[in-house]
Amino acid sequence: MAQQFEDKFHRKFYYLRLSVTDVCNFKCTYCLPDGYKPSGNKNSSFLSLPEIKRIVTAFADCGTNKVRITGGEPSLRRDFPEIIETVANTPGIDKVATTTNGYRMANQVDTWRQAGLTNINVSVDSLDPRMFHQITGENKFHQVMSGIDKAFEVGFEQVKVNVVLMKDLNAGELPAFLHWIKNKPIQLRFIELMQTGEMDELFQKHHVSGVAIRNQLIADGWILKARGVNDGPAQVFVHADYLGEIGLIMPYEKNFCASCNRLRVSALGKLHMCLFGECGVELRDLLQEDSQEQELIARIQAQLANKSVSHFLQDGNSGSTPHLASIGG
């Protein structure tokens, strides 16, 4: 194995978030309120299967053991099952996850599981079909919920559900969400609304701090769970009376980045040190031949020397990220 990917702050990177498309068919208020708009470059195409294989192999050879396939909406790619299979068959990768809006799950999640998917996250921002429609721009609540049921049917032991809580929209639904997971093995992940380049006004209007939720959970007997080496950034809480769990993702909290263990590659083959970093580093020219792997690894390792100790969200600086779909959320 090549040298473990590590930055100058001695953070090791076990986790790759790999975007395979920036296209999404939902119009979530906090991400793509006006819907997907293609980038201006007509010659750009998303990473091919061979390119995906090369990037994942390089990461696996440097200690990465978890890959999350993201978008946009990754299931919009017709070869999504082949992408899962390619990642799952890479030596060294033992966790293959995806984040989806869930609208195709009822019909396709069995195929994804057979292809090698081990973990699944679904975005469900409201348990009220009308509010779900208002936030996502799509009247697909019942299809998404059927997809979650189907995931359990085909053998997933846990489904993670992502919720972006927003003041004056869905923030009052916390009791309903808690009731929902009482007897279901769902890890409910409350994600703080994050400020991006196109979302300043929305952020000011709807941001809810996760600290108040955490304080309420602790008061109600929820206990913090130990964090795994390739886990994402959530603080996960468990309760003796609940089958489900709760995760809090609070990027504005001090030291949020101290445990960073993940890197990102965009659907166009750019390496991003951070969701809120700058323009990214081109890798695609080194994804054309298997023989380029050592050069590819060297370029990634060189960039790790430039990874900042933290993002600067707390200072109101969201970097150059225009919206969350642009590099895979």
Image: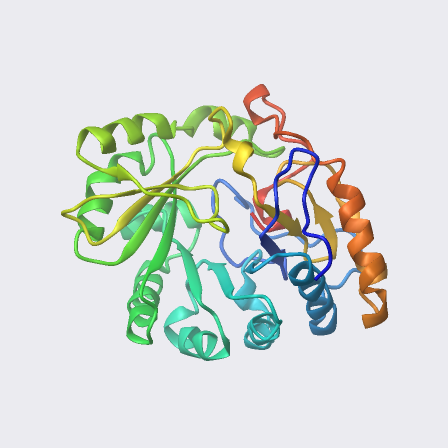
The x and y percentages for residue 4 are 68, 52
The x and y percentages for residue 285 are 85, 60
Q: Quadrant of residue 226?
A: top left
Q: Quadrant of residue 110?
A: bottom left
Q: Which residue, as the protein is rendered here, is positioned at the far top? A: 315
The x and y percentages for residue 241 are 14, 47
- Seen from the viewer's position, the closer of residues 225 and 246 is 225
Q: Which residue, as the protein is rendered here, is positioned at the far left? A: 241
Q: Is residue 35 visible?
A: yes
Q: Quadrant of residue 67?
A: bottom right
The x and y percentages for residue 275 are 61, 41
Is 11 displayed left or right of 174 in the figure? right
Instruction: Residue at 21%, 45% (x, y): give it.
Output: 178
Instruction: Residue at 39%, 27% (x, y): give it.
Output: 209
- Seen from the viewer's position, the closer of residues 48 and 77 is 48
Q: Is residue 43 visible?
A: no
Quarter of the rendering occupied by the N terminus: bottom right
Q: Is residue 195 above or below residue 288?
A: above
